[in-house]
Every structure is written in structure tokens, then in C-alpha cells.
Amino acid sequence: MIWYPYSQMQTMPAPIKIKSAKGVHLFTEDGHDLIDSVSSWWSVIHGYCHPEMNQAIAGQLENFAHVMLGGLTHDPVQKLSEKLENWLPGDLNYCFFSDSGSVAVEVALKMALQWNTNRGSSRSTILALEHAYHGDTFKAMEVGDDEDYHFAFGKNSEKKRGVVHIPTEIPALEKAFQEYGNELSCFIVEPLLQGAGGMRMYDVSFLKRARQLCDEYDVLLIFDEVATGFGRTGNRFVADLVLPDILVLGKALTGGYIGHAATVANRRVYEGFLSDDPTHAFMHGPTFMGNALACAAALKSIELFEKGGYMSRIRHIEDISRREIGSLTHPDIREVRIMGGCACIEVNDSSVLKGFREFACENGVFARPFLKYMYTMPPYVISEEELVKILTVMRRWFTEVR
Ligand SMILES: *Cc1c(COP(=O)(O)O)cnc(C)c1O
């Protein structure tokens, strides 16, 4: 028996069984063709069954699928770390690999904490954002601000003891640094676009001010770009605009083929672990870190991203989204938000979206609305016609069904 994610198993509708998938299309067992409007949790940026991606993995499989990084190393992981070193901005050059975004967030937080301990500081408070989502492991849940997890920490959140949550507003940011600046080990954010917290978008000026304050108060700035990385916000990485000390990548890193993630530190963070004292080493090592198939997939994914003109594709996706739903108004709609390869319609009440998933399905689109959010984050290879089909289904829910 499969225990499905984020579901009340007693009432969960039967999941749709997929037989094969190609490009942006999911082909169901009972013969339907559905356009995937959410890229399998935002990861499948090149679409399904991409011949070059398939070939990259098959090629590596001829050599070996996996060897551990404990005492061993290999070409795919070395090439991927070199590629990231060259490709990422600034001196974000030190790659710690792991198997999922949540674990990569744990790694980033542990790094920030120990970086402070190593230099004899007792700073342990973490600054984070309201409505943040950083994954489902425990520390990630603590820095997150998702009501679904409040059960784990009790009402009124005892969790807030080591973590301070602020809204994405500069006055609140400045106040938090005044109040806690000298206790903070790090400030972790999903930059520009908060995904699972409701596709909330905010201005880069907030991040620029955050960078200044982190410098002023000697606090590490962590960008969780598990969702925003690889173009989703219309920037290659938000780190291209404002440079963090630690960058977390996941989801699209492997083009959605194999779970893998990277926590990339700058020189200053890395050097904080270099010492004659063995206890200053970073004691962490996921079994499947640097998995060779995942690294081969990531290398090919980055190559496709670079040679495929993806940034202009994403601009095109944004333009079409604005044209099709940008000015949509309806009594049920609270706000329409569009940024890069993400378009979201926030409604006034979650009941408004009841039945939308089925409606989309009947019209050839796989959608997965949650709470008050109807959204699309399509694969970047989507054609204009296919994207218009998704956005039309979203619009018709209000203009024809509601
Ligand atoms: C999805 C997500 C994670 C968690 O990644 P997993 O691979 O599911 O563990 C962390 N941070 C952000 C911003 C995410 O969107």
C-alpha cells in the first residue's frame, strides 16, 4: 500500500496513473493526454523523456550507477562541481551534494551554525520569512512557516524559540536586525518567489537591504533556490542579482530526472572549516551524495539550459502568461501574480478551487492547486499553443464555470 504525500488517505481521490510521458505530455493508463502544468513539482524543466537527458544517464550507467564519496570520487561529480563553480556567481565555489532539497537545506543550516561555533561564537538564532517553505525535514520545518507543520511544534509555536520569522518588508527586516542582529547565525530566504507558501512574490530591494544588514551584523545569508534556481523567476538564479553566502539548489538541478541537491558555499564559509582541529570539519555525508547518474543528469541539464536559449524561453512564458491571465478579474480572485515561469491566481477562499483539478483534467491539463492557489510552473520547453491551453483552462474556471 502506498502512502501518498500531503493527503488524507481516507478521502484522497484516486491518483492518475501515468503510462508514459513525453515533452510536456503525460499519457494516462486510460488513454488521456494531459499537459503537465506544474513540471512534476517544478523540476522537469526540459520535459519528459528528453533524448539527450536519457542518453546522458544511459551513458553513465555503462560505467557505474553509484559509488560513495567517502574516500572515493569520480568524473561526473568532479565535472559537476567544476561546472557549478564556473557557472554560479561570485565565489560560490564549494559544493556539498545531497539527495534532496530538504537535506540540502539542513546542510546549509548546519554549516551556518557550525561556521559560527568554529570561530568561537555562540550565535544560534535563525532569521527566516513568514510563509517560508524549506522542506519537510525537522530543521527545515522549523525555519519554515507552514501551518501544516504547526502540529509538530505545538500551538503558538515553541519552535519560534530559535527562529524569528518576519514578513518580506524592509522595516520589519531592519527591526529584526536591530533586535536580534548580534544573536543571528544566518538569514534564510526563498529569494523573490516563495513557492509552497503560496507563490508569494517580493521585490529585490528587500534582498539588497538584507545583504547590507547581513554584512553589517556579520550574519550569513542563505538563498534557498531549490524552487527559484534555473530560471524560474526570470533570472538564471536570484543569486545573480544579490550574492548569498550559501546557495541551495535542488528540484530542476537534474532536470527532474533523479533526486539530487547541492549546498554551495562561498570561500569565507568554506575556510571557516579549515583547521588543524579535527572537530572543525563538517561532519555530514548522505549515502547518495554525488550519485553518478544524478551528476550526469545535472551536467546534461545545465548544458541544455545554456544552449537552449532558456532565459528567452522563460521571458516568452512570462509574456504569454501576462497576455492570457494578467488582467483577469473576478469576485473570487484576490490577486493574479506572474513572475518568470510562474503564474498564480490567488482566490479569496479555498472552496473556490474545489473541482478545478477535475475540470482541468477533462480539458487536457494536469493541475495541482493547493489551498487558495491555482498556478502553473510549466516545463520551459512548452510551446505557445500548449501554454495557452493551460492558461485558458485557468481563466475559463472563472469566466465560464464559477
Ligand atoms: C521543494 C523545496 C524544498 C524541498 O526539496 P525536496 O527535494 O522536496 O526535499 C526546499 N526548499 C524549497 C524552496 C522548495 O521549494
Image (spheres, helix red, strand yellow):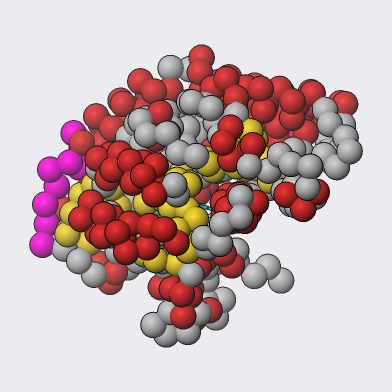
Q: Is residue 324 magenta?
A: yes
Q: Which residues are magenta?
A: 323-331
- The answer to whether residue 33 is seen in the rendering is no
What type of secondary structure mainly makes up the magenta span? loop
The single residue placed furthest to the top in the displayed view is 307
The single residue placed furthest to the bottom in the displayed view is 155
Q: Is residue 78 magenta?
A: no
Residue nearer the viewer, 68 or 158: 158
* Up-down relation of residue 172 to residue 51 (above or below): below
Determine whether, in the image, residue 344 is placed left or right of residue 23: left
- Asked which quadrant contains residue 56, the reply is top right
User: x and y percent of residue 277 in the render?
Assistant: 78, 47
User: x and y percent of residue 86 in the render?
Assistant: 57, 20
| Quarter in which the N terminus is drawn | bottom right
Residue nearer the viewer, 344 or 26: 344
Q: In percent of the image, x 68 and y 47: which residue is there?
A: 99
Q: In percent of the image, x 66 and y 22: which residue is there?
A: 82
Residue nearer the viewer, 81 or 47: 81
* Up-down relation of residue 64 to residue 332 (above or below): above
Determine whether, in the image, residue 157 is placed left or right of residue 103: left
Q: In percent of the image, x 80 and y 48: which residue is there?
A: 278
| Quarter in which the C terminus is drawn | bottom left
User: How many callouts does the rendering have?
Assistant: 0
Determine whether, in the image, residue 282 is placed left or right of residue 185: right
User: x and y percent of residue 370 in the render?
Assistant: 38, 62
User: x and y percent of residue 313 in the render?
Assistant: 37, 23
* Up-down relation of residue 117 to residue 81 (above or below): below
- Asked which quadrant contains residue 204, the reply is top left
- The answer to whether residue 242 is seen in the rendering is yes
